[in-house]
Image: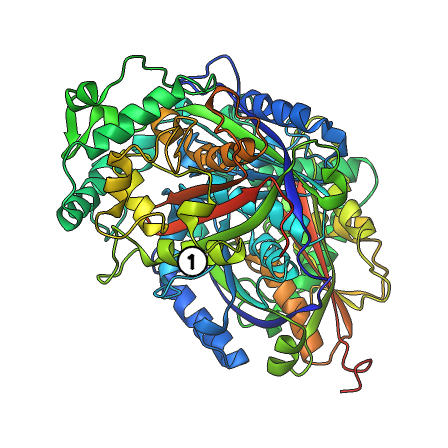
Amino acid sequence: MGKQPAAVIGVGQTHHRAKREDVSMAGLCREAIDRALEDAGMTLDEIDAIVVGKAPDLFEGVMMPELFLAEALGAAGKPLLRVHTAGSVGGSTAIVASSLVQAGVHKKVLTVAYEKQSESNAMWALSVPIPFNMPVHAGAGGYFAPHVRSYIRRSGAPTHIGAIVAAKDRNNALKNPYAHLHNEGTTVESVLASQMLWDPIRYDETCPSSDGACALVIVAEDEASRSSNPAWIHGTVMRSEATSAAERDQVNPQASRDAAAAIWKQAGITSPIDEIDVAEIYVPFSWFEPMWLESLGFAEPNGGGWRLTESGGTAMDGVLPVNCSGGVLSSNPIGASGMLRFGEAALQVRGAAGEHQVDGARKALGHAYGGGSQFFAMWVVGAEKPSN
Amino acid sequence: MRDVAVVGFAQRQMKEFDGSPTCVELLVPLFAECYEQTGWTRRDVGFWCSGSSDYLAGRSFSFVQAVDAIGVIPPVNESHVEMDLAWAMYEAWLKIQTGEVDTALVYAFGKSSAGILRRTLALQLEPYTMTPLWPDTVSLAGLQARAGIDAGLWDERAMAEVANRSLTDAEKNEYAVRKGGSSVEELLSRPMYADPLRKHDCAPVTDGAAALVLAAGDRAREVCERPAWITSLSHYVDPMSMGTRDLTRSPSTANAAAASDLDGVEVAELHAPFSHQELILRSELGLGDDVRVNPSGGALTSNPMFSAGGIRIGEAARQIWSGEASKVLGHATSGPALQQNLVCVMEDRTAQEGR
């Protein structure tokens, strides 16, 4: 028995905010789960297994929180898995959930990823001193700024490219009722006028810190007919590379390039820019849009990415709309951010993305990365059942 | 389902590991052992998955450094669960079932001695009403043991019998950190630790790491004379709430047993960190008196967090490889008082295959 077809028939997410003090962790997850189940026309009782994902436990201050959450998530009496693969975890979790179906083990799987950063302090959680390791003490922005500078130097990018991305994503977020940031009137000029935090990354070019969750219902072929618009999974991939290696190319990591090559092959795609209608790419800092466009093969290395962004090609009406939901730049519940990318990609090919829908989207990429760009998770979903 | 077997196993267990909480220094030699057993290099491994806990390591992303132990240039197909090795193995088994890969190496690690384990594990409880009371693991297990004694399901003597058998069997296990049986009477004369638990009723705090190798079909037959074919692999979770569940039962274990074919199991390696928990597990799994339990000595003699469950599967698989048994069971548990349980049944098929 080979790989079984699997499809997303339910997508749910919370309203993302800096502090969701109106709900507990369980309440936050249930908000997303209940929306996903309603979308799928299913009840929790029908679900065979549950896969939970989130970033480090220190972000909430609970060790293996899925254990105390088990009952609230409807997992009691069922199989429960907990995935943790750094920032890519939301994507990896969706992939593990889909593998339960693709392996033929289960027919109806619920997956949920969340982060409730307001329960603890993510900066503290990332700054615990580690013996024999050089402290960064700069947050994620300080870690990634040198990679961005290196990209600008290599590619000769004009310095306002990041601001184009930020203005685009923040305006896209105005069309997404769930987005954390609804900053009206954001323009390239206003982004460029915002405070420089980690040169060349300005305040308006960084993701917010959010509480939020995302849930998906993934089902086998014979259950997909419950939905009038299933998003079929055409390919999934995870790749990891070393953290400590002098030869790493952190601007365009080999794990990213390898993952892209594998996902396009699996999905039968030879020209991503022509065949992918819309992409949700993990862009926590604006400049990562052009960087990942190149790494993923949507544009030529060392300059194709920023040219595509600058041309308006990644806008809602562009050749490859990127992050129509507003992306990570507008909502960042860390553990859920990857699943939001995967879920938004599914919404697009289901024609269910609402105001930020791209007309006629048939094939979409969901992308997540984590750590210091060592960990990658991606999937391609389509409106048609895959032939492979 | 594809035929998948356990074909490699390596472990390190010790009272105190004199190294980093990410245990990278332990993992490198473990991988080397797995390569030696299979004749593979790391490029023969189709999928990697690890299990560990950030709270045990006292830092975020503790698995990130551990990934470096693989030597991941070029990059690898890799994942991680914040769970025991047994569930990392489950994810790898799934990956093989999808047909994407034919082989996997899974590993896990934990340095329990880096903190006060029973206190660290209190952070695993419900954070709003339970953790603020800091109920520690041993005390919670004590409540469970007491509930069974009060219900007349077992007594201190039955618990001591489990401990004595485990300590006696552990004498043959070079990795056991506590060993040496005596007699039930002698054990019962020892002082109480957390009434009704004596120290030997509780797993010792243990550091360690372990790795398992999985392979499908002919890839398994190529590298292993008697592969331990996985015939059932199933896991369930129960609600955590200590006040509303019957602590003398483990419904998740019963569910996993019901989903498995346990007929004819000769050896069972049960992950029971407390003596009375073995009694609960045996009952929920319906194991007869003729089933040999924990020939390795089990978790009462060595219990490295996040690998001890997977080690049960490895120890059970070894019984197949050596020809000592033809059908075995490996069990893993997680969470307070047997909240989450996994059952893996493995069989020898050399006779059917005429090999």
| Direction from residue B95 to residue B144 in the image, left or right | right
- The quarter of the picture where the C terminus of chain A appears is bottom right
Q: Which residue is mark 1?
A: A261
Amino acid carrying label 1: it is Ala
How packed mark 1 is, by other alpha carbons closer than 10 Å (few <14, some 14-19, many 20 or more), is some
Residue A287, percent from left and from top: 25, 37
Residue nearest the observer in this picture, B173 or B158: B173
Location of residue A166 with respect to B211 vertically, above or below: above
Residue B297 visible in image: no
Residue A333, percent from left and from top: 42, 29
Residue nearest the observer in this picture, A54 or A205: A205
Residue B96 visible in image: yes
Residue A282, percent from left and from top: 38, 38
Residue nearest the observer in this picture, A350 or A360: A360
What's the colour scheme? rainbow
Could you say which quadrant of the image residue A192 lies in?
top left
What is the chain identity of the residue bearing mark 1?
A
- The quarter of the picture where the N terminus of chain A appears is bottom right
Residue occupying the point 62% across, 36% down? B140
Could you say which quadrant of the image residue B116 lies in?
top left
Looking at the image, the residue that sits furthest to the bottom is B355
Residue B33, percent from left and from top: 48, 75
Element at label 1: helix
